[in-house]
Image (cartoon, rainbow, N blue to C red):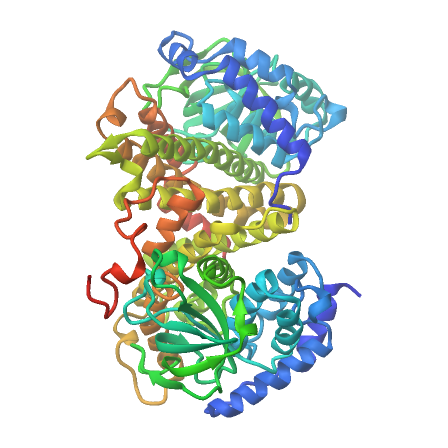
Amino acid sequence: MELVLNSEQRQLRSAVRELLEDHAPSSRMREVMEGDEGWDRALWTRLAALGVAGLVIPEDRGGSGAGHTERSVVLEELGRALAPVPFLASAVLAVDTVLALADAELSAELLPQLATGELVAAVAVAGDDGTWGSSAQSITATRRNGVFALDGHASFVVSGDAAHLVLVYAGTPEGPGWFAVSGEATGLRTTRLRTLDPTRGLARLDFAGTPARAVAVADPAAVLEAVRDRAAVALAAEQLGGLDHVLETTVDYAKVRVQFGRPIGSYQAVKHACADLYSTAEQARSVVRHAAWTADHDPEALPVAAALAQVVLGPGYFDSAAAGVQLHGGVGYTWEHDAHLYYKRAKTSELLLGAPGEQRARLADRLAL
Amino acid sequence: MSFRDTVRDWLAENVPKTVENASAEERIATAKRFQAALHDAGLAGLTWPAEYGGQGRTAADQQVFDEEAAAYDLPTDVFMIGMGMCGPTIVDLGTHEQKARYVRPLLRGEEIWCQLFSEPGAGSDVASLQTRAVRDGETWVVNGQKVWTSGAQHADFGALLARTNPDVPKHKGITMFIVDMHAPGVTVRPLKDMTGQAPFNEVFFDNVRLPAGAVLGEVDAGWFAAVTMLGHERVSIGGSVRRRYDPLTYANLADLARRLGRARDPVVRTELAALYAAERALSLFNTRLRQEADAGSPPGARGSVAKLAGAELLWRAVRVAGLIAGVRAAAWDEGDPAAEELALAINATPASSIAGGTNQIQRGIIGERVLGLPKEPQVDRDVPFRELRVGTQAKA
């Protein structure tokens, strides 16, 4: 097991961090957040040019054939900067779905475009209650004249509003199945949801006789689970990046903010809270590295490692982001300060793949409790 | 054959069976035989320098050993202070003579060590200690009292902190010594802890004479030696492998839940999963620290994270144990060893967040030495020790 980054992985981290410092500072992120589109196309293009969208895509499909540790490194940086790009949707959920579907034709067509970032794709797996897989109840696929059409709706689709293509988990008379739908398809209506976190778009998709391409796969539910595990690992890495940012900015502030004649970080009440943030972050980092390593090297252990990552990172990031706001005091509660953006991202991330109780129950299942 | 296979086979052949109700003397005799055999097999002191009787291997090998050893209850607790704290400090700061004299017997289990730091008036604030060592020609004469000294009743040697100069500020007049616990004037008195057992002691020094070669590190530089040893202690405590029969591990609490028919309770399940997560997160953190150490970055003060997280983990486990067992953890029929073990573990848990530096002290260390946060104003920093109000010393 390798829990320490090697020099190439550290170089990748520096490259992504520098790009984000230059092109996605907080001021730019806020501009995008308050703009109409909700995501940063120019930044996405620059990131894609680094090759980061295809890190887990094999070389013969246009990717770099690196691995989950490398992708985690990128996600940490995106989470640290709250970069408003559809990476989680396209380079994680969609890429992992196409890989898990393992359909030669679909892979040949989509993976090279996903790797370059020209194609932005999203994955629709949830209905109104947000449960993974519940879209199989809220969307039905019917075959008419040899062509499939979808009816119904999906919700909580990450970057659903940015996608040129949506991979949909829908119900058929024979059970759930996977479908590919063009973002331009007739009868597809995309509506951005109001969101707690203004830096990541979630959408509702309404299908009305929308033409769809069926993707044949032996066990559609197994694909759903495989994608969810990989998403848990990827999201955990993004959460870790945000947690690191919270830790660093909070400690920096505690060193310079003076009250009662001394930096507040000299008071035990503040110092000990910072120590707890650090302890959380260091353990979280170990869990994320382990989960990414497991995804590449020990797939049988992935279900436990992935659930573990969400159990640790979900509440770990949110509690830390909340402490970050608290330790900044009044200024931390202002719109102008970024602390609230991490708080909102952390809460959203904690719930995105299932609320904490559900994550713990999922881990318990996998531990055969 | 891989190193892991070597370790596995050797342990399977050589770990002695636990004897119920063995006397302390019998347990120590067993431990000494086992440790000597371990050393003969080339498996003791894996990461220690070969020159002094260690094996000169990597932290990764140590991890392999620990993982394999986790399947057993090794009888080696009595050596933990020597191996985890005193020995590594001798390797760091000792003279060639000291290393040559003490390290090999320590690794072979021939000599047992204790750590003589805390005093009734110097707990978290160890640097305010009052035990005096006064130079008399070539030798030193020690007077004073130590407390909460684990294993002193069995120890052959101790690492002692004593004040050698009271006319300078408290951190600047301390020296570390190696003390022969069998020397005239050393008295060890058992001290009962809150579990009712007496694993620790009070130790009294009454005109105990130490040779010049007993100084470990430099005279009056004992605080540096102490910080070095405390760093080893935190890593040792935080990174220590949980005992197989420890009733507060995830695995054993999950078993308890199954035995008591509580494993399907949704709250028990989710709390057990959270306990697993906390246990695994800490263990992965310890693995990462070792990998970083092998790659050339020693843990330093980050060992405090392991110690702090380890204590928090135990407290979480105590809550989960209560959730699972209910009142059955509070009262039981005579002759139920599992219930006895659980009760003992519940009663011993406060030690985890006190011994070796309280959780509050660990958070202070993380805050100041890892994160670089400013210190509290120190009212006693630049004042000569003899003018301070510490222990039994009245303020001048």
Q: Is residue A1 above or below residue B19?
A: above
Asked whether A146 or B184 is in front, the reply is: B184
- Say which residue appears at 62% left-offset and 39% top-offset: A5
- Say which residue appears at 61% left-offset and 36% top-offset: A69
Q: In which quarter of the image is residue A260?
A: top left
Asked whether A298 or B203 is in front, the reply is: B203
Asked whether B82 or B145 is in front, the reply is: B145
Q: How many circles with numbers are drawn on the protein?
A: 0
Can residue A184 be seen here? no
Decide if residue B292 is on the left or right side of residue B303: right
Residue at the extreme front of the image, as rendered: B137
Decide if residue A346 is on the left or right side of residue B221: left
**Percent of width and height locating residue B54:** 69, 68
- Say which residue appears at 44% left-offset and 48% top-offset: A362
**Percent of width and height locating residue B7:** 70, 70
Can residue A323 be seen here? yes
**Percent of width and height locating residue A28:** 43, 11
**Percent of width and height locating residue A86:** 50, 19
Asked whether A270 or A193 is in front, the reply is: A270
Q: In which quarter of the image is the C terminus of chain A?
A: bottom left
